[in-house]
Amino acid sequence: MSFETLLLEKQDGIATVTLNRPNKRNAMNPRLHEEMTVALEQLRYDNEARVVVITGSGPAFCAGMDLKEFFSDLKSKPAEYDRITRLAVEWRGRTLRYFPKPTIAMINGFCFGGAFSIVEGCDLAIAAEEATFGLSEVNFKLFPGGSVSKSLANLLRPRDALWYGMTGRPFDGKRAAEIGFINVAVPLAKLREETMNVARELAGKDPFALKATKDGYRHSLEMTWDAAMSYSSAKEMELVVQQNDAWRTEGIGDFLKGKYRPGLESHDKVHKG
C-alpha cells in the first residue's frame, strides 16, 4: 500500500517507517495518524518485518502535532477531532508500547511535543547528537497534553520532566541520553549505521523471546509482586508451547554442552553459524 505521509521500506528483516512531510518538519496531521494506524497494523502481521524502525525525512524527526490541521482546522468539528485524537493517542501509546515486535525510534533531527510520545512508545531510541528536542507547548500558553504528559511521567525524573515542560527550553541528543529519554546519542553521520546495527541484532534473536521480554516488562509495571510472578510463570509456559521447548532443550541444552556462552553471544547466531 502506498502512503501520502509515510515511506515504508523493508530490508534484512527490518521495516523502516519514515514520517514524510519534510516541508512541515514531519508534523503529524490527521492523514498521518490514519496512515500510521494502517501501517502498524500491516507490519504487525508481516513476517518480513521482524523489527520496526521509525524515523523522519529531511532534517526533522517530528515537530509534534500539525497545529493548523489538528488544532485549528478541527476546532469546529468535535466528532472528527475526537476520532483523530483517539487514533493519535492509540498508535503512539498502546499500539507501540505493546507491539509484538521490537520498535526503535531513530531520531535524526527536530523532535518536539507530540513526538515525545513516539519516542517513549518505542522500545529503544537512538538519536543524533545534533538532534533538537523540546516541549514548546508552554510557550504558546498550552501544556504537554494528550499522551505527552504520561510519556514524560513514564520516562523522566520529576525534576527533568518539569524543568523542560515548564521552561520550554530545547535540549540536544547528548542531553536526551543523559536524562534517560533515549538510549544513546551518536553523531548524525553514524545514526543510521548504529540504528541498523541494533535492529539487525534484534532481528537475529528469537521473536517469541523478544515479545515475552517486552510483555514481561510492560505488564509488570502495573502489577503487584505476586501478580508479576504469576504472569512470568505463565509466560515461560507460553514460550514452551511457542518454541516447542527450545529455550530449554536448545538454549540451555547447548550451553551445557559448551557450544556457546549466553552472557557473551547469542544462541541463534552460533546455531546458524
Image: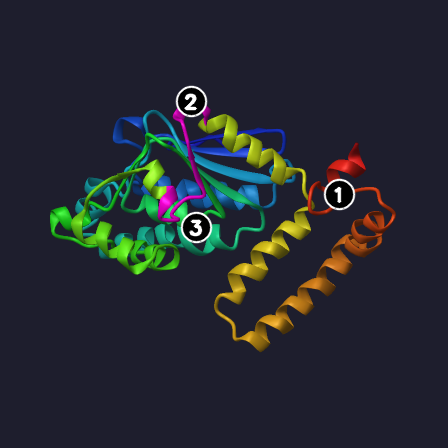
Place of residue 61 in the rendered image (x, y in percent of width and height, measured from the top left):
35, 34
Residue type, mark 3 in image: Gly
User: Which portion, as a residue range, is magenta?
Assistant: 177-190
Q: Which mark is residue 121?
A: 3
Residue type, mark 1 in image: His
Nearer the observer, 261 or 195: 261
Question: Do the residues under discs 2 and 1 have CB atoms within 8 angstroms?
Answer: no
Quadrant of residue 204 within the rendered picture: top right
Using residue 1 as the reference point, say whether residue 33 is left or right of it: left
Place of residue 224 in the rendered image (x, y in percent of width and height, measured from the top left):
52, 75
Residue topped by disc 1? 267
Residue type, mark 2 in image: Ala
Question: Do the residues under discs 3 and 2 have CB atoms within 8 angstroms?
Answer: no
**Distance from label 2 to label 1 (Cα)?**
32 Å
Does residue 98 appear in the picture of this structure? yes
Q: Which mark is residue 244?
A: none
Q: Residues within 10 Å of mark 3 (few under 14, many from 20)?
A: many
